[in-house]
Image (cartoon, rainbow, N blue to C red):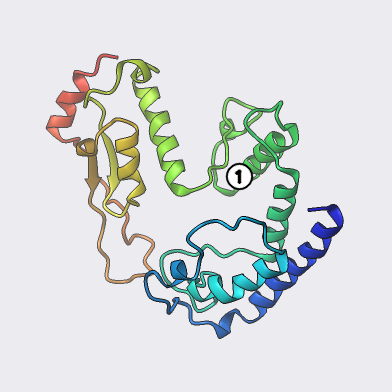
Amino acid sequence: MSPEEFRRQGHAVVDWIADYRARIESFPVLSRVQPGEIRAKLPGVPPAQGEPFDQILADIDRVILPGITHWQSPNFYAYFPSNSSGPGILGDLLSSGLGVQGMLWSTSPACTELETRVLDWLIPMLGLPEKFLSSGTGGGVIQDTASSASLCALLAARERATHFASNSKGCDGRLIAYCSTQTHSSLDKAMKIAGMGLDNLRHVPVQEIARRDSPDRCRSPPGALSPVPADDRRLRRRLSY
């Protein structure tokens, strides 16, 4: 695709997105298609030749749109909010156009320094101490999903508890993690991936309060973790990394 063709088709895509967002409330929030209906409209083998982009965009309306659950609709109340904004979409477009690889500072200094600065902005907003600043001993990275963030947090805790020995020696069922009964299932998966074992995840009960808007609802009550269960205390004493 030449730069001129990219420019023309890019305008068409932005127009399509703008029109979609303008008429999003006209669609049923939950897709009405039956299982296999979208798949049946797609060819069984990839096309031998590339199709014109205009035709691909038309297929979005004909094939893809009927199978979309409209998370961006103001009438969507399921699962969790994941709304995109116009500025965010344009930011994604710029990011894709640059094709940034943020693995190391040297692979893209701007990516690394922008990310750490944005995280520094969050520290006073969250009431965290200044040691979390990237200019100090802290710092961090933005994770792509809650699931990967849970895994990274669990791995960091694992390595701190074992003085970085578990990567070579393994966990051997000697590490215990605690979470509330309301914790997302991604932590269950993280326990498996991290080699700590699902049986070693303890679910701490939370408070049940009649008022759903109460700030104490679903909060772990004082003393829920004290005393630590006797079996876990004995297990902790045997930890000898």
- Locate residue 69 relative to residue 119 in the image: left or right: left
Q: Quadrant of residue 47?
A: bottom right
Q: Position of residue 103 (x, y in %)?
A: 62, 31
- Locate residue 113 relative to residue 241 in the image: left or right: right
Q: Position of residue 82 (x, y in %)?
A: 52, 62
Identified at 61% across, 33% down, the residue is 133
> SS of the residue at dot 1?
helix
Q: Quadrant of residue 218?
A: bottom left
Q: Position of residue 61 (x, y in %)?
A: 60, 75
Amino acid type at circle 1 is Pro
Identified at 65% across, 73% down, the residue is 58
Q: Say if 126 sits above or below 47 in the image.
A: above
Instruction: Tell which of 125 and 41 is nearer to you.
Output: 41
- Locate residue 27 relative to residue 228 in the image: left or right: right
Q: Say if 179 sits above or below 87 in the image.
A: above
Identified at 77% across, 64% down, the residue is 9
Q: Position of residue 117 (x, y in %)?
A: 69, 39
Q: Quadrant of residue 206?
A: bottom left
Q: Which residue is outermost to the right?
A: 4
Residue corresponding to mark 1 = 124
